[in-house]
Image: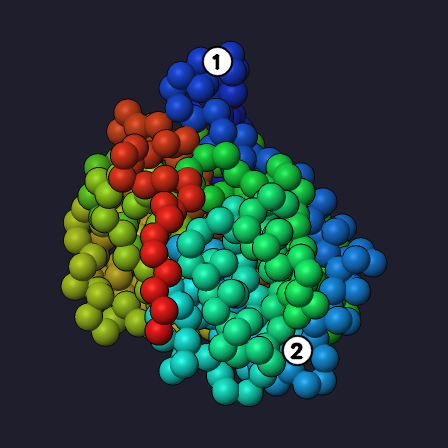
Amino acid sequence: MSSVGKETKTNAALTELQARPLAKQRELGYADTLREILQQPATWRDTAGMSRGVAALQIITRTLTPMLSQVVLTGSGSSMYIGECLAPTLQLGLGVPVQAIAAGTLLTHWRSVLPQQPGLLISLARSGDSPESAGVVSRLLVEAPAWRHLVITCNARGKLATRYADDPRVTVLVLDERTNDRSLVMTSSFTNLLLAGTGLVQGRSGEVTPAAIERAATVVQRIFAQHADALEQLAGRDFSTAVYLGSGGALGAAHECALKMLEMTGGQVLTMAETFLGLRHGPMSGVHPTTLVYGLLSPDPAVRAFEVDLLRELSRKRLGMAKLLIGEGIPADLVGPDDVAIELDGLAAQAHEEIPSLLAGIAVGQLLAFFRCLSQGGKPDTPSLGVLTRVVEDFAIHEG
């Protein structure tokens, strides 16, 4: 199944799915998810234009002042993983400490985990209606009043976008309505929130330039057109577990892709996310003959060297059923006959520019999970029906 050095010239899998009438797609439960995955390259171009516009610059000017000594990114579930992807890029560009802290952790342990000096809290959210999302902002406005807040959301009508309109300490950036995914799982909302967050380093080190975004959009469109069939075939293979590997900000991408597989299969495929180096310290014992290994390779040659060593170790020990490798310039010896390698041609322009590679790697992980769901007879728009909801149900926000 190895695809290194060649590209699939047909796209039968996606062509057949898209050719069905919309009513049939909805009946089969994939209309929203498929549209939202495939619209990503187009929406990235729009989000990039918004984040580089006058309004975004005004937001940055008002919120990032010399008084702010650190940045905390927060969200729940997938939104938390956006923060993990974004934190290294923001720290490089802003020159201040940046960390990602889950909204649930801030809600229950803000006194012990929130830095003592005032800073900027960036809340990332698709709907902005999850109980802990607004709960954190409301609590910190009272308990840590010196902190400033930037909300980036896909929903203009959500609590995060509307509740604090009169508070000068809170600034809201709402993305295009198309990014407010209707599917239960976050796909285009995830990548567009990630991309919007990079607007904070516009004109600084780590900036994601318009040219880099265009390259990412072009590469992902090509992946959809040329590698969907290989991903469908891989998704249909007999694996019961999947391990997702990434370094630096790519660990957030690994977390997100692992969650997509878990969500879309209703837990029938158990997943784990780790760093390449961290896999050796115990988690490697969970790589079995029925394990799929996903590896998002770093564009930084120094980091890549560690990752390649780990992948060669897995091959030497004959661990895993198959590998799905994503990156630019993937060494041929890493790719066995049962593996799939997807080349990200042109995305490793600068070693520190990891965001374009993350966007591509996340899109690949989404499509893999989508195909796995369909292969199991599931409905990607509403997987885990009765267990999960698009927005977490309300729960009590306890004082403390």
**Dot 2: element:** helix
Question: At which x and y percent is residue 128?
Answer: 52, 51
Residue 319 quadrant = bottom left
What residue is at 48 percent from the left and 69 percent from the top?
Answer: 139
* Residue at which label 1 appears: 23
**Residue position for label 2:** 94
Q: Label 1 is placed on what type of residue? A: Ala
Say the numbered circle drawn on residue 176.
none
Contact, CB < 8 Å: mark 2 with mark 1? no
| Residue 327 visible, this angle | no
Residue 357 sits above or below residue 122 on the image = above
Q: Residue visible at 44% across and 51% down? A: 130
The tag earlier along the polypeptide, 2 or 1, is 1
- What distance separates the C-alpha of mark 2 from that of mark 1? 48 Å
Where is residue 135 drawn, in percent x and y?
46, 61
At x 50% / y 87%, what residue is drawn? 116
Q: Nearer the viewer, residue 334 or 370?
A: 370
**25 relative to 245, above or below:** above
